[in-house]
Image: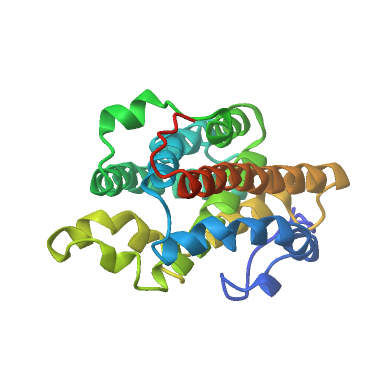
Amino acid sequence: MIDPTAFTRTGPLMDASSYPAWAQHLIADCCEAKRRVVEHEFYQRLRDNKLSQVAMRHYLIGGWPVVEQFSLYMAQNLTKTRYGRSPGEDMARRWLMRNIRVELNHADYWVHWAEAHGVTLEELNAQRVAPELAALAHWCWHTSASDSLMVGMAATNYAIEGATGEWAHRVCSGQAYTESFPAPGRKRALRWLALHAEYDDAHPWEALEIICTLAGTQPSRMQQAELRQAICKSYDYMFLFLERCLALDLQTQRTPAAEWVG
């Protein structure tokens, strides 16, 4: 028997109109929370190479758990799937298996970026940063471990990957930061940024397609609310992270000799 509420995409992958009306409303409802992240002053200062080294070190150290554990978030969501139980789960299963290895490589590239700023792996793992910089990783772990498959993927693969691609593109749109690295090591230092700055990155849209396939064309209001809350919470924790890093930068710019722990 054909499910009248089943969703199968027929339009272009990266076009919001290809998805159910409820998903289009979801995108619109979360737009402002996402904008605060993508257009944050921290990334403008990074693009223009105006950040202090103290702020940049804290950013790289604080962001490390999310990058290092992102494949684990995906693995936790993978454990929620069962082969043949639904088209959405089968789609999620294949997609997560295929992309987990990609995320493992991204951890290497983040380490290279950190090394270019004088941050060692030991410092990344020590995590001597303010609580605001740890909150995003805790949230990602919580939602991936505790929430439904579609909510966990919405919070991580859709929200975080989507916003990250957009802010990375903005940072790489200028030359001040990218050209601040010596030419011989520039490609290695910027590999993580360059990969995420690809404006045609399909990953968040692929995640949205999986979410819509899982939810169908008529999810309950509660399901829609859960998705909205999870997506916006990811954006909000990203914003909190950036606000703390920007505050460190502004404080350090006023007192250059200070050393900040967190």
Determine the image quadrant of residue 204.
bottom right
At 43% across and 59% down in the image, what residue appears?
46
Residue 82 visible in image: no
Image-based side of 27 in relation to 140, left or right: right
Image-based side of 186 in relation to 203, left or right: left
At 38% across and 62% down in the image, what residue appears?
49
Question: 18 or 37: nearer the eye?
Answer: 37
Residue 31 visible in image: yes
Q: Position of residue 53 (x, y in %)?
A: 36, 47
Question: 2 or 70: nearer the eye?
Answer: 70
Q: Position of residue 14 (x, y in %)?
A: 57, 71
Q: Position of residue 163 (x, y in %)?
A: 56, 57
The residue most toward the left is: 184
At 56% across and 54% down in the image, what residue appears?
207
Q: Is residue 30 above or below residue 121?
A: below
Q: Position of residue 31 (x, y in %)?
A: 71, 62
Determine the image quadrant of residue 171.
bottom left
